[in-house]
Image (cartoon, helix red, strand yellow):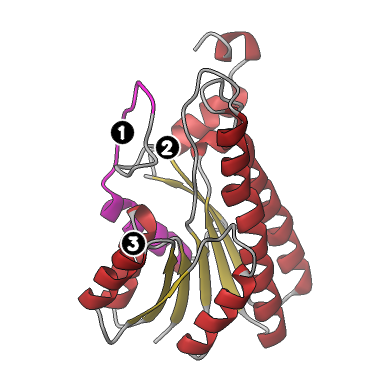
Amino acid sequence: MQKIMIIGATSGIGREMARLYAGAGHLVGATGRRQELLYSLQLEYPNHIVTECFDTTAFGATAHLESLLRKLGGLDILVYSAGWGEITETLDWAIDKGTVDVNVNGFLEAIHFGWTHFMAQGHGHLATISSIASIRGNRHSPAYSASKAFQSTYFEGLHIKARRLGIPLYLTDVQPGFVDTKMAKGPGQFWVAPAEKAARQIIRAMERRRWRVYITRRWWIVAKLAKWLPGWIYERL
């Protein structure tokens, strides 16, 4: 039985990952801002899910992570699934600040906590739910793309650092395309995957210790095209 912490498990991909892990007999520590959603999740798997209600951007988030660690009695995997962003045609300070608070500052605090714990015990697995939007800037939500690029680039650095250390400390940067959650916003959506399917593919990739994965798998095509598309074409999309 593995002990897994999922930060941002009240809805979407994080909630589905918690269900799948708990259904497979693992012990899951689920976090989120909405107590009622955490409670309903715990009721589904009362013997396999423990919870801690807090906002990743609030002061004292690490203390909540430490509390959840005690409830779990150990930790093998930490997944950062919390995320936020909004479509805006104006440069909205409140949206940009909120996006960075969750996707950068909250992310950093959680990953530092997990990295420190795994370094001390000599093994572990960190994963972040980034986005295909991390590859290029986006006029509809520039802060979201930039914050997800931060996550993916940061994880690449940690991945290299972990390999140099030569210990079984693994990282997985997950870059989903469109998934049927509240985070799927904006026009022109295609290849929209159910959250449960996305969660299954993520868990499978983590089991194989993949360091970067596109969800669903066909999105690697979009990733490759986006990286190499000339700027004068990309700016017209």
The amino acid type found where label 3 is placed reads: Arg
Q: Which mark is residue 191?
A: 1
Query: Mark 1 to mark 3: distance in Å?
Result: 21 Å
Q: Is residue 120 left or right of residue 98?
A: right
Where is residue 44 drawn, in percent x and y? 21, 74
Q: Residue at x 62, y 77 (%)?
A: 63
Assess disc 3: are there few (<14), some (14-19) or many (≥20) residues with their C-alpha within 10 Å of its C-alpha: many
Considering the numbered disc 1 on the image, is that residue within a helix, a strand or a loop? Answer: loop
Q: In this view, does 161 lie to the left or right of 50?
A: right
Q: In this rendering, is residue 79 above or below 165?
A: above
How many dots with numbers? 3
The amino acid type found where label 2 is placed reads: Trp
Task: Please give the residue where the numbered disc 2 appears in the rendered image.
Answer: 219
Residue 75 visible in the displayed image: no
Q: Which residue is drawn at 49% across and 67% down?
A: 54
Task: Please give the residue where the numbered disc 3 appears in the rendered image.
Answer: 15
Assess disc 2: are there few (<14), some (14-19) or many (≥20) residues with their C-alpha within 10 Å of its C-alpha: some
Q: Give the range drawn in magenta.
A: 186-206
Q: In this rendering, is residue 129 above or below 218?
A: below
Residue 227 visible in the displayed image: yes
Q: Do the residues labelled 2 and 1 touch (CB within 8 Å)?
A: yes
Q: Residue 6, located in which quarter of the rendered image?
A: bottom left
Q: Residue 191, located in which quarter of the rendered image?
A: top left
Is residue 189 highlighted in magenta?
A: yes
Query: Mark 2 to mark 3: distance in Å?
Result: 22 Å
Quick one: which residue is furthest to the left in this view? Answer: 44
Assess disc 1: are there few (<14), some (14-19) or many (≥20) residues with their C-alpha within 10 Å of its C-alpha: few
Q: Do the residues labelled 2 and 3 touch (CB within 8 Å)?
A: no
Query: Mark 2 to mark 1: distance in Å?
Result: 8 Å
